[in-house]
Amino acid sequence: MKLIACAALAALPLGAATCEGLGSAKLANTRITAAQTVAAGAFPAPAGGQPGLPAPDFKSLPAFCRVQGVIEPTADSHIEFEVWLPVAGWNGKYRGLGNGGFAGAIDFGGLANSLAYGYAVSATDTGHKGGATDAAWALGHPEKVADFGYRAIHETADKAKELAKAYYSNAPRRSYFSSCSNGGREALMEAQRYPADYDGILAGAPANYWTHLLTGAGADLQALNEPGAYIPATKLPAIQAATLAACDARDGVKDGVIDDPSRCQFDPGQLLCKDAESDACLTAPQLTALKKLYAGARDASGKQIFPGRVVGGETGPNAWADWITGREPNRSLMFAFGTQFFGNMVYENASWDYHTFQADRAVKTADDKLARTLNSTDPDLKRFRDRGGRLIMYHGWSDAAISPLNSIDYFQAVEAKMGAKETDGFVRLYLAPGMTHCAGGPGPDSFGQASVSAADPQHSATKALERWVEDGTAPEAIVATKYKAGPGGEVIRTRPLCPYPQVARYKGSGNTDDAANFTCVKSN
């Protein structure tokens, strides 16, 4: 094996096939800063973790080759990355990981999860250090914005596959990418801009219309800052109760989840306070703000800038109080994302005053300056399809961060560009009723979308994607599970997720918490 590996290294050319030898690998615009074999169970657990997922068991990891490096495609680039390569038991596949928010950190949990199942895997900070809601690094650094927008993910994939080929003497036979939110944007960027990087792509809740998404955040902020318009978290339960009363039972099952919120006929006007204000009603200014949140950002002519929020996911963890309204005024996550984006990336003014925000002007400026760098909205996926690529998108119907209607818009744009039949041959979209941003919420939210597991393709989007790529079996329904205390705990409910535009319908008999008693039908 070593002789074969050395021959491969000479051809690349790289330094050596041993892990430590990879430290001298010569890769374009790249410095390898460390390459060492980590003994089984010896990797020290880093601080933090991936929200919504159990902490990785680093002590159970097998031995692996850990390669750390920096990619510098421009004078102002500093893209840190890691590649983890199993010492034994490599499954022949490579897995690339994405980033949430404004990135700024390596996803060690994702690396550990993929390694545990035999993958060669990579992750990157996309070219800067910082918290998920921090874009101060972008101020005055357009090349770093480009690294974040598209370059870092591609460069990391390219270098990771070269290192895997050197270490194993064989290139990965299949490559996959998986991520959610900004990572979903990265996923679609790969399919559109670099279709040869991955054979299969799993794109969750994609923030692919980045400039319009964050213009929408500014419009929401503006609506909530009108005199008396702020909606406190204490009023959100009343709003959700009204939406559920209007539409929960529409799908034939009253279970606290609206099956297809886009078809819910709900009049927010019923929440107007008739007498004294209380948490059970809304004042006139609050009602106006709520209607604007549901309607979404629009320009002066009424044209949609970004889809509005859908009904049914207003309260609970990872819902409106976190993302939209905040626990107090101007303390929501979307406030942070919107103000950081416009202050540091669009206007490049750290003291930019959000009170001056005007949606029409803001979206034009953002599009003119950054649409090509940050948006992954091109519906022409012909190059990706022609090389055999497969794409699965998913989105929670109760997502308070990014409207699920945006994913539907992109899917339909691909159909319009490439034809419905052609699109069906390589793209699937799954909408998860009651799921919040990437995971969580009252609906079944665990279907192998966030990590590799031992689940089969009927219960794992990750495995369904791999089977589609490797065996040609297109995925149909994927069973999602709601656990009482996270994956592996007590099962509360299962429900099939159907490929859009199909939805799950109760058969009329049997336990309504059992997926077996539902079938996929076209929504009506």
Image: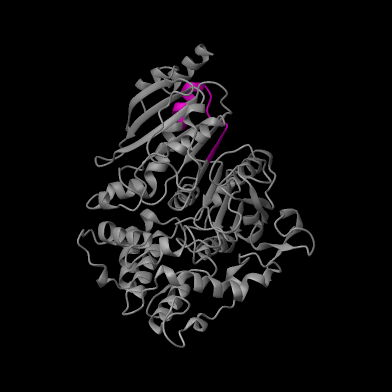
- 81 or 488: nearer the viewer: 488
Q: Position of residue 458 (x, y in %)?
A: 69, 46
Residue for point 55% across, 58% down? 435
Rendered image quadrant of residue 444 = bottom right
Q: Position of residue 349 (x, y in %)?
A: 21, 60
Residue farthest toward the bottom in the current orientation of the protein: 274
Q: Would you place residue 101 above or below residue 239 in this image? A: above
Rendered image quadrant of residue 88 = top right
**Magenta residues, start to end:** 161-176
Q: Would you place residue 514 above or below residue 104 in this image? A: below
Q: Position of residue 467 (x, y in %)?
A: 66, 41
Tell me, yes or no, if residue 308 can be seen here.
Answer: no
Left or right of residue 355, residue 363 in this image: right
Q: Position of residue 185 (x, y in %)?
A: 45, 53
Left or right of residue 306, residue 129 in this image: left
From the image, which quarter does the C terminus lie in? bottom right
- The count of marks equals 0
For residue 174: magenta? yes
Q: Would you place residue 498 above or below residue 110 in this image? A: below
Residue for point 33% across, 59% down? 336
Left or right of residue 490, residue 86 in this image: left
What colouring method underlies this structural image?
one colour
For residue 321: magenta? no
From the image, which quarter does the N terminus lie in? top right
- 72 or 58: nearer the viewer: 58
